[in-house]
Structure formats: structure tokens, C-alpha cells
Amino acid sequence: MELALNQSKGRKPATVSKAVASANGKEAEPGWAQGLRSLYKAVVDEPLPPSFDDLLKKLDERSDG
Amino acid sequence: MDEPAQPDASSLDAFKRELLSVLPHLRAFARGLSGRPDQADDLVQETAMKAWAARDRYTPGTNMRAWTFTILRNHFLSELRRSHRQVEYDPQLAERLLSMEADQEEGLHLADMERALQQLSPERREALMLVGASGFSYEEAAEICGCAIGTIKSRVARGRAALVTMLDSSPEASAELPDEAAQARPFEAAEDRAA
């Protein structure tokens, strides 16, 4: 089975159920809605990348001042 | 000790804590808008600095997420206009997306979802990210985008229909894809500025 769908590094090939989307075609509520939410949540759950260190430091300095 | 002109340290701390707590949400929203992780994170950092600079305009106790999302999307749009970056429709990519979907039995990959999202016009993408992904109400989303509630509703409905079409593996459905995706274009100022 092919999982290499251009996954960016470090991200697991997360999946969501497509059962309902396939089952009732046009009104496929849960398919797209769950997909969107999962997509969003996947990023929310990521730890902040190191590129944010500077920003966090700046905010720290400013509120101490 | 406290100087009258300056907000006290505890309210600054509270602001900072709130701002930090929405960073993961800003990242998720930005990722959906731009589709490029690096660009999205830049956007978030710039948004955080703008929010910090504008902290006097934030009313404590109101919705920090909505407030910062507004800053982020406005910033995203002005960057989009400034760079004249077109949202490109790539027919081959769309084709690959559809054939991959047809091969998959057990699940919808988030990467595919992300790709399908990027095929939408920016305003539909934004509406779906706000209402479908971040869980804002239509009213809140309308406020964030500075447009009418009906406009948001229609963007969500059309965006959703397009997503379903793209994620649906049936061949007849795929025939509609190019029409939808071909409409992908940068936001139009007139439409979005109409308050």
C-alpha cells in the first residue's frame, strides 16, 4: 500500500474515516467536516517549532520590561 | 512604582499568556490558508508581533482567538495582494489527487485533504477553515472576514460542495473539478471590504 503521498517530514500519515463520505455521496457531512477538523487539530497538536523561539523570547523580554 | 501611562505587569502577563495560548490555533489556521508550512509559520509570527504591538486595542476577556485570526487573515491577504501571488491551479496535481483517492479504501489522508483545500478559491478556503475547522460560528467568521453572514454561509456551502466533489472518488464527480478549481483566485478587495 502506498503511503508516500508527499508527506512532509515528521508527520504521520494520519487518516480519518471515510466511511460515511463514501456511503452517502453528496451529503457527505462527516467526511469533509471530520477531515477539516482533523487537519486543523493535527497542527494545533504539533509542538511549536524551534523557529518560534525568537518570538517567544521577544515576548518574554517585552513583558518583563 | 507603577507609572500611570503604562498597563500594569499583570495585565501584560495575561495578554501574553492568552496570545501564547492561541499560537497553535494560529498555526493551524495559517496552514490551511497558505498551504505552505514555512510561509504559514512566518505568517503566525508576524501576526503575533502585530498583535503584541496592537495590544492596547484588545479588550481583555474578549475572544483572543477571533481577534488574532482577524489580524492573521488581513495580513495574509495584504501579502497575497502585494506579491500578486496567484493561486495556481495545477491540473496534473488535481488528477493525481483524484486517482490517489480512488485507490484508497480505508481512509482519507490528511495530506489529501490539505491538497483539496488548496484547490479552492482563497475565500472559500478561509470560510471552511473558520467554520468547518476552527469551529467559529457563521457570525464570528463573518466578523473576522468583515463580510455578511450570508456571504460566509454561501462560501462554506460552495467550498464544502467542492471538497466533497474532490474527495469523492467517483469518476463523474471528478469531471466537475476543473471548473471549481479554475475559479481559484486571490481575494477580491471589493467583495471582502464590503462591511
Image: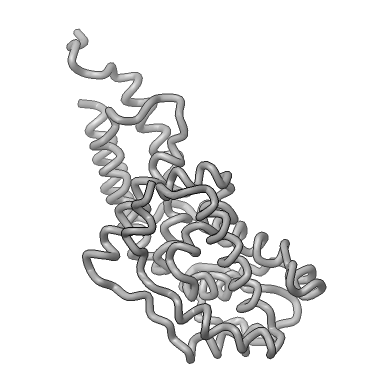
Q: Position of residue B113 (x, y in %)?
A: 58, 71
Q: Residue B139 is drawn in which quadrant?
A: top right
Q: Position of residue A12 (x, y in %)?
A: 57, 69
The answer to which of B43 and B78 lies nearer the viewer is B78
Q: Is residue B47 left or right of residue A24?
A: left
Residue A45 showing in the rendered view: no
Numbered circles on residues, count: 0
- The colour style of the image is one colour
Residue B155 showing in the rendered view: yes
Q: Residue furthest right?
A: A23
Residue in the picture at 31% in, 42% down: A56
Residue in the picture at 32% in, 75% down: B86
The answer to which of A19 and B82 lies nearer the viewer is B82
Q: Position of residue B60 (x, y in %)?
A: 40, 25
Residue B142 to residue B118: above or below:
above
Q: Residue furthest top?
A: B1
Q: Position of residue B48 (x, y in %)?
A: 32, 44
